[in-house]
Image (tube, grey):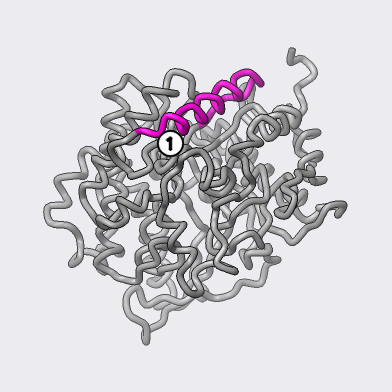
Amino acid sequence: MKLTRSDFPQGFLFGAATAAYQIEGSSYGGAGSTHWDTFAKGPGNVVRAEDGAVACDHYHRMDADLDLLAEAGMDAYRFSTSWARVLPEGRGRVNQEGLDFYDRLVDGCLARGLKPFQTLYHWEMPSALADLGGWTNPDVADWMADYAEVITKRIGDRVHSIATINESWCVAYLSHFLGHHAPGLRDIRAAARAMHHVNKAHGRTMTRLRDLGMQNCGIVLNFEATEAASDSAADAHAAATQDATHNRWFIEAITKGTYPAEALAGFGPHMPQNWQDDMAEISQPIDFLGVNYYTRNLVAADDAATWPSTKPVIGPLEKTQMGWEIYPEGLRWTLTRLSRDYVGDLPVFVTENGMAWPDAVGEEDTVRIDFIDRHIEAMHDAISEGVNLQGFFYWSLLDNYEWAFGYEKRFGLIHVDFDTLDRTPKASYHALKSAIAPRKNDT
């Protein structure tokens, strides 16, 4: 790789990220059912109807996986705690075995010199709460805050940071308007309410974390580089609408206490009553912003479609296994835009960036190495332009359960054989390890 640790500011953190449902094995350790367990069994929702019951069996292989992080020279590990593992019914009875697991996980990180970056919610709504409407129910804000209190009282004294929610757009829009993720709805009223209630839950959880005396708390949002497919006014309007729903909705609520007009044009009539009353709590200060970035999307107008009257246009650039364009310049642009327009000098972390590729054990993995290299250069450029970028987490440490794509899409630095669950570090693991080796003057 062209850049190494020495090219980044002192204290810049390098790490890798995972998520509970994607790696742990939800059938172990007393975890409750989630809406992903049942969504996966619906017709056509997930490749081969696969679920996270076993996943990578991280529940039983945690120590070996943490060793792989440490052996790569990582500084930090970003993981999520499963709501349904802590509270199998979403409320009420606490699963002590689940708390014990996360206790061991945090202690295991610290024993290896890894800073634990916790995410409270990475998409696994307990089924008992999904039965009550999940993210469409305004009470979800209090449900989540109560869950946050339980887990924080157990591990909050040792985690380095806490993110409330991972990728709010996926939680709300992708799952309630487009229907691609659990709970699989395609309903504008449900989507509008979920879009707001996700923010409300973030705000209420931040309030609870502050009441518990927690610092270094924030949120992880996903951003795309949204561009008009042509120079036409119609396509420019379509791109502005998608930018509002995909990029601006959550960051503007959190940093400005407002929603973009282009998005309210569609969602406004379906929003919860008196939603404006929640905006002060939603927009309370955060200590950091996590940025997940993967690709750009070209957008064209589609007058024949219902709101938002947009359609995707396939771009000309090289694609990943997901069909996403490889566009590192979009990461630099996203980071500088966020710094300029929304967060100023607030600490920012690239909490996810990576690529899926159909690689196998023994392959050279050159495409992924080049992908990481170019995106690290984009981060370096953003820092040179004044962005207070403090760390980068590759997605993902392991090949894992990739939601609606089952086990077909491989994002990992480490290959997982899903028959034997054997782990094999890829060439990209070794390349990144070499790049982030300690500086000569580090001890």
Q: Is residue 119 left or right of residue 309?
A: right
Across and down, in percent, residue 175 comes to 40, 62
Q: Is residue 96 left or right of residue 312?
A: left
- Residue plotted at (55% across, 52% down): 53
- Residue plotted at (58% across, 59% down): 295
Residue 233 visible in the shown view: no
**What's the amino acid at mark 1?**
Ala
In the depicted structure, whether residue 23 falls above or below residue 37: above
Q: Is residue 319 magenta?
A: no
Q: Is residue 388 left or right of residue 398?
A: left
**Seen from this angle, which residue lies furthest left?**
274
Q: Residue 151 falls in which quadrant of the image?
A: top left
- Residue plotted at (60% across, 24% down): 109
- In the structure shown, which secondary structural element does the residue marked by tag 1 occupy? strand
Residue 242 visible in the shown view: yes
Exactly how many numbered labels are in the figure? 1
Between 433 and 58, the residue placed more toward the observer is 58
Magenta range is 94-117
In the depicted structure, whether residue 57 falls above or below residue 68: below
In the depicted structure, whether residue 417 falls above or below residue 207: below
Across and down, in percent, residue 57 comes to 62, 44
Q: Which residue is mark 1?
A: 163
Q: Quadrant of the C terminus?
A: top right
